Image (cartoon, rainbow, N blue to C red):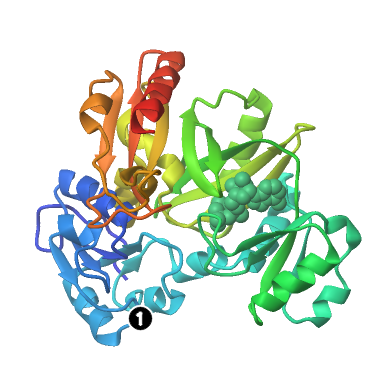
């Protein structure tokens, strides 16, 4: 495998992207800005990334011929979502450079492996995951300790945006919820008293050099990210350093190459718990496009091309607001579609609007985001609230 840098604007300048969502689209924009071309493998027609990419192979993520076409077109590969079959990344690694590797992605695909990884590294990071139990069969229910209640039952695989999660207050509720999932392997996590949530975006190059972004503070609504604020209004310097150091230890431990996002909970007593990680650029890192010298997507391009990573310095305070499909629908007349008032939003001086070009708005579907970039965090927060009022 060639680990020499891959330069843009020559015959090997095509980057391979498995996945066609908005993360892939923003990756394409940054890759093209650097002079690269991008080939997207995505089964759906008209996906956000394929619209922007230089080429689109319309095939399943595990389709042998699709993977072969991607391998023929590109010498380096990445992915934009963690549920891509790890075997597909392993296949691509036979002919090219894959960042992050199949082994790293497969840890992040499975909450059980992820928690085992965090626990194994805890002597170095001094941060543990939430108390939890692994539920593979009904027999495992008997062994669940009473102090995991109230808890959250999470499917071990394929969960995102709060999907695949059920809150359970008692053993009875757990039994019912687990039975309803019909044999899916799960994790029961103790419900923790969260003071606030943060994420740490970290990137590591093929040469082992790593960079860590400022702490991002995240607010979720109904299990979906609502806003990200940077700098974090709540985090102490001590907690910031602790989680940033932990992220650097974790990314090095598995020899990860590329962008990794690690979510942490800060509890009411000030202690820190590690929640989960995403083996790719993350929604809470979208602010880096407008507020940092090097965005998380440009960083991913540099890492997979074995180029030096860029400066993570943030040049403006900012708030990122996610735009969900709900605002296309009138709440009174349920099914009438309307256009959100983008003219009014864009009249706010700090607003950068990003729309992902999705063909259809659906409730709870991520359609875009707005970053508010202002001289002060107060102004960014104030204009974010004005935008919320405009969009309803
Ligand atoms: P997803 O893969 O859907 O992002 P998460 O595990 O991050 O799943 O859970 C989504 C959100 O649910 C978290 O950001 C947090 O707000 C809440 N949550 C998850 N686990 C816990 C917990 N153990 N205690 C309290 N809140 C939790
Ligand atoms: Mg999460």
What residue lies at 42% left-to-right and 46% top-to-bottom?
A: 283
In-image side of 123 versus 88 (left or right): right
In-image side of 145 versus 283 (left or right): right
Local secondary structure at mark 1:
loop
Whether residue 327 is visible, yes or no, is yes
Task: Residue 261 in the image: state x and y as whole percent.
Answer: 50, 48
In-image side of 290 versus 57 (left or right): right
Question: Height in image: 352 above or below 67?
Answer: above
* Quarter where residue 77 is shown: bottom left
Whether residue 14 is visible, yes or no, is no
Q: Quadrant of the C terminus?
A: top left
In-image side of 300 versus 356 (left or right): right
Task: Residue 383 in the image: state x and y as whole percent.
Answer: 38, 20
Task: Residue 268 in the image: state x and y as whole percent.
Answer: 76, 33
What residue lies at 69% left-to-right and 54% top-to-bottom?
A: 121
Tell which of 40 and 309 is nearer to you. 40
What residue lies at 65% left-to-right and 24% top-to-bottom?
A: 236
The residue singled out by tag 1 in the image is 62
Tell which of 258 and 286 is nearer to you. 286
Q: Quadrant of the N terminus?
A: bottom left
């Amino acid at each position: 495998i060639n680990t020499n840098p891959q330069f843009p604007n020559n015959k090997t300048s095509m980057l391979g992207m498995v996945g066609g969502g908005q993360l892939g689209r923003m990756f394409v924009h940054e890759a093209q800005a650097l002079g690269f071309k991008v080939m997207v493998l995505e089964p759906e027609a008209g996906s956000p990334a394929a619209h922007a990419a230089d080429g689109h192979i319309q095939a399943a993520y595990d389709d042998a011929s699709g993977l072969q076409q991607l391998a023929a077109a590109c010498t380096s590969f990445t992915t934009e979502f963690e549920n891509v079959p790890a075997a597909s990344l392993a296949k691509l690694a036979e002919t090219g450079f894959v960042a992050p590797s199949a082994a790293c992605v497969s840890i992040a695909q499975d909450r059980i492996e992820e928690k085992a990884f965090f626990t194994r590294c805890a002597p170095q990071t001094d941060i543990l995951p939430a108390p939890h139990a692994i539920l593979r069969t009904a027999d495992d229910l008997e062994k669940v300790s009473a102090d995991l209640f109230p808890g959250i039952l999470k499917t071990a695989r394929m969960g995102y945006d709060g999907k695949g999660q059920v809150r359970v207050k008692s053993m009875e509720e757990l039994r019912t919820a687990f039975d309803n999932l019909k044999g899916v392997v799960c994790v029961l996590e103790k419900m923790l008293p969260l003071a606030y949530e943060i994420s740490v975006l970290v990137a590591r190059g093929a040469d082992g050099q790593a960079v860590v972004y400022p702490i991002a503070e995240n607010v979720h609504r109904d299990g979906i990210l609502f806003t990200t604020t940077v700098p974090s209004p709540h985090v102490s310097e001590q907690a910031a350093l602790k989680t940033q150091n932990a992220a650097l230890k974790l990314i090095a431990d598995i020899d990860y190459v590329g962008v990794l996002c690690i979510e942490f909970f800060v509890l009411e007593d000030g202690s820190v718990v590690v929640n989960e990680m995403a083996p790719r650029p993350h929604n809470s890192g979208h602010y880096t496009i407008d507020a940092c010298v090097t965005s998380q997507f440009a960083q991913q391009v540099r890492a997979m091309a074995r180029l030096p990573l860029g400066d993570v310095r943030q040049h403006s305070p900012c708030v990122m607001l996610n735009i969900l499909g709900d605002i296309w629908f009138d709440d009174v007349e349920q099914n009438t579609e309307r256009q959100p008032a983008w003219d009014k939003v864009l009249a706010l001086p700090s607003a950068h609007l990003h729309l992902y070009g999705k063909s259809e708005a659906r409730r709870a579907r991520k359609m875009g985001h707005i970053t508010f970039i202002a001289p002060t965090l107060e102004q960014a927060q104030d204009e974010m609230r004005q935008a919320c009022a405009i969009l309803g």
